[in-house]
Amino acid sequence: MRSPVSTLSLSLIGLVALLVMPWLVTSEYYINIASQIAIAAILALSLNLLVGWGGMISLGHAAYLGVAAYLSIYLTTQAGFGHLTGALIAIGATTGLAMIFGYLALRASGLGFLMITLALGQILWGVAYRWSSLTGGDNGLGGLKRPHPFGLNLMDPTTFYYFVLVFLGIALLCMARFMQSGLGQSLQGTRDQPRRMHALGYNVWLIQWLSFVFAGFWGAVAGLLYAYYNQFVSPQALHLTTSAETLLMVIAGGTGTLLGPVVGAALVVILKNVVSAYITRWLILLGVIFVVIVLFMPEGLVPGARRVLRALKNSPHTDKDADVSSIVRDRTQ
Amino acid sequence: MLCFRILLSTTVLATLALAPAQAAEPLKVGFMTVRSGALAAGGRQMEEGLKLCMDEHHGEMAGRKIDLITADTAGQPAVAKTKVQELVERDGAQVLIGPLAAFEALAIDDYIRQTKTPIISPSAAAEDLTQRKLNPWFVRAVGTSAQAHHPLGEYAAKDLHYKKIAIIADDFAFGHEIAASFQRTFEENGGKIVQKLWSPLNTAEYGTYITQIDPDVDAVFAAFAGGNGIKFLSEYKNYGMQKPVLGAMTTVDEGILKRMGSEAVGVISSGWYSAAIDTPANKKFVEAVRKAYGADPGYYTVGAYMACQFLNNALEQVKGDISNKEAFMKALRNVNIPESPYGPVKLDKYGQPILDITIRKVEKKDGRLQNVVIKTYPAVSQFWTYGADQFLKSPVYSRDWTPAK
């Protein structure tokens, strides 16, 4: 009974911390870093839907980030669309792309799925790199001005941070709701027992495809925010390293958990942008941290920390019964 | 009363004496380099060049101490954006030097305009930075992609009397711009580009491209960046190719020339700098670099070194006071260095230096390969002989510039 309450209070503390962050941190630089974390977290959350709950490991998730970013910048700066229509078309078209990619990639599972998503991602990268009349080639596209929704000035880092935070909140709510829904539950079923689910009369392919498209939609939202944040996009956004980095966030934070990808995103973004200022070889540090996570918390930071906390709480000094149960649990795990 | 007067006058004197002391607080200069990833070698040379210049000035310019803050952009546009924010917002950098790659410079372009931070580019060569996408806060200390290669096209047609040439170049903006500029002047002087091959930046093996080269050409123009020149030239020789090779500045840059052998000998290229330029200023510079780092200075070394000299020259014009950014920017665009490793420097009104372009030939001298100067085109503009207005009317050089015939 105790644990849901503590989870709730922990989330509340976290929420309050996120909201007051701009008052505690006065430097615009760190507020911008926080915005970046939130954007990366949305992308990681959407990938987590596939990896954690669907058991579909994708190496092409940068596709949605990049395509939505390219589309929104192209539509607003060159094709003459307004911000709102540009954003809606970008998200709609990117979700449409996810429908096609899902149709193609879900013909296979496991390693085959991974390779197809990788290939599709690389095709998009190649297109962005080569079709320079449209994408600016490796020079990228720039010149986007941040919009002014409801009279908010998004050029202000704090306002922008809250703007992104709202999207992160909605994303978290949607993910949580999705997991409780019948579709989310059956997605986990197809992950664990695809054949049994099939035998039970579920349309495994359709469940996976719908989840794939839903993930693509949130990838597109992340891409849109990415475009607003950077006001620039280049083929780097579509590159394999971006996909791999996102996957790393999910795995490091904890697959199949709601908060894991957020923690993972924070870890990677902070290492990449803040720690790298002090440590030249930050990539080695990232590698070391990842190895340590795999060694001591193979399930990821969030579930790992939960396990450690539980073990501490259930230590013999506080509760003998719980001690026994924890031993039993550990045995059975 | 007298006492009061003395007191007053001493106070005034003291205030006057204090004023310069206030102006002498350190000037914060943000420096963006690359320490990880594929571009790290160039980044290291930039750091060497910059350090050499800072040491030359004993860390002080126009009476102000220079506080240099270095950031690693990892050669990624999105990281470059974060790093420039870090430098400006957190560390309070007042002037920026960097970044290395053109796509990084383009990624931070909007931010530079927004914050109005003066920036000196030590390496990024993309044409449009000083042409069609002119940024009032941007000044470049190196040549544009095309600047050094317009003369080479003319030289190949007029002096070498080549008629048919095949181009092989890196498939990215820098390669496209170099190839197109060479093609333009070469064809205007009666030559013909019969073939254009584009190899990806990370090509592991050039065999498939070398075997495609038309056997009837008079020469091959190879435009490569990074370490690709090393791979291409050695494989070109291994395939038994006899046709002479013309190179872009970076194909046989001093930074990689030290890792090449006999295959590079005889390659004719053009550039806005060669370590072998025979002037007292350059000799002094090359000697200092050789002494400190045991190698000849190349593109990135001299680029960063000159960016730092630009800063010094502009600071001296405004006497170390950059509180008026507009005035400082004007000084930066007004940089005038009569003697430098790459010759006398003046900027055009687009913030791009007008440079002496040399035609160089790789020869073995003093036990090492050198880009020996065989001809100099003095004071070459980024617009070559076309004039700014006419030049800017046509779109920026790209992969699709006039196809090969």
Image (tube, helix red, strand yellow):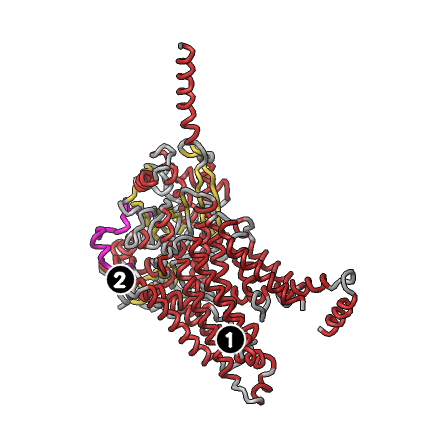
Left or right of residue A6, residue B210 in this image? left
- Figure quadrant of the N terminus of chain A: bottom right
Q: Is residue B310 above or below residue A285?
A: above
Of B247 and A129, nearer the camera is A129
Q: Amino acid at mark 1?
A: Met
The quadrant of the image that shows the C terminus of chain A is bottom right
Give the vertical position of A320 relative to B371 (above or below).
below
* The quadrant where residue A91 appears: bottom left
Q: Residue at x 44, y 77 (%)?
A: A101
Q: Residue at x 28, y 55 (%)?
A: B132
Spot occupied by residue B399 in the image (x, y as percentages of width and height): 32, 64
Tell me where residue A83 appears, x and y as whole percent. 33, 64
Tell me residue A110's x, y (percent): 56, 78
Tell me the subunit letter for badge 1.
A
Is B280 magenta? The answer is: no
Q: Is residue B251 above or below residue B313?
A: below
Kind of residue indicated by mark 2: Lys
Residue B395: say if magenta.
Answer: yes
Disc 1 element: helix
Q: Are the residues tagged 2 and 1 within 8 Å (C-beta)?
A: no
Q: Residue B181: which disc? A: none
**Residue B163 — which label?**
2
Q: Is residue B334 visible?
A: yes
Magenta part of the chain: B372-396
Q: Nearer the viewer, residue B125 or A50?
A: A50
Quarter location, residue A66: bottom left
Residue A115 disc label:
1
Answer few, some or many: residues within 10 Å of disc 1's Cα (few below 14, many 20 plus, some between 14 and 19).
some
